[in-house]
Image: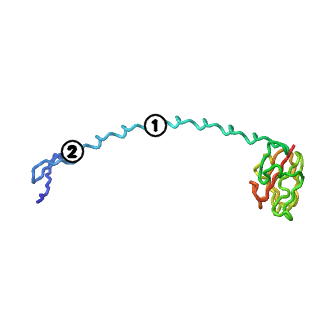
Amino acid sequence: MVLPLIVACSSDPATTTDAGAGADVVTATDVPAATDVPAATDVPAATDVPAATDVPAVTDVPAATDVPAATDVPAATDAGGSAFMALAPCDMESMYMDGTAVAFGGANGNTYSPNCLRVRAGGTVTFTGSFAGHPLEPSVRGTSGNPITLVNTGSSTTVTFPNVGFFPYFCSFHGNTNGTGMSGVIQVVP
């Protein structure tokens, strides 16, 4: 049989007596207070962590100017030179023919004829065909300073090539800048 617990009222809250056993009962006031727990100030402060300024600065990385510039590429030379630049679709020196004109469209379809043309520095090349159906566009490959500009109207344009190099081009409808489809290259020799 379980006896009920009776709590006596007393001015001393530290103990109460059980009516059945007469023994002291410990109350919540005997539990250590929360102030006995170590304070948060005993934890190392964030200032003990190394500051971000101890990390090497990004300025210690070599600058991009340390990379060789595209102008460090040897300049293109004449047909027998060692600086031949294989640019699709004209991957071999033997693919180039001397001339001053490139035709496209009509009987040539979606091709340039010839698509690998060689001229002397200061020479001109005349492109003939419908630019509305085959817009002429310079490629981002090859020698910098490509004198070919976007032409999307008319049927003839003449381009002067003052500098030695390789100057690729393409039809923006039927080719692309990487030399596939309707594309070509003008090789300018000294």
**Kind of element beneath mark 2:** helix
Observer-nearest of 119 and 91: 91
Residue at position x 59%, y 38% in the image: 58
Q: Nearer the viewer, mark 2 or mark 1?
A: 1
Q: Position of residue 128 (x, y in %)?
A: 88, 59
Residue under label 1, please give it: 49
Quarter the C terminus occupies: top right
- Quadrant for residue 39, please give it: top left
Q: Quadrant of the N terminus?
A: bottom left
Mark 2 Cα shell of 10 Å, populated few (<14), some (14-19), many (≥20) = few
The label shown at residue 57 is none
**Amino acid type assigned to the residue bearing label 1 in the image:** Val
Q: Position of residue 66 (x, y in %)?
A: 68, 37
- Residue on which the image places disc 2: 30
Spatial CA distance of label 2 from label 1 is: 40 Å
Residue kind at label 2, given as amino acid type: Asp
Q: Residue at x 52, y 37 (%)?
A: 52
Q: Is residue 174 above or below residue 69?
A: below
Visible in this render: residue 14?
A: yes
Q: Toward the viewer: 8 or 177?
A: 177
Colour mapping used in the image: rainbow
Which of the 4 image quadrants contains residue 179? bottom right
Q: Residue at x 22, y 48 (%)?
A: 28
Q: Earlier in the sequence, mark 2 or mark 1?
A: 2
Q: Secondary structure at mark 1?
A: loop
Please report the residue visible at 65 percent of the width from the left and 38 percent of the height from the top: 63
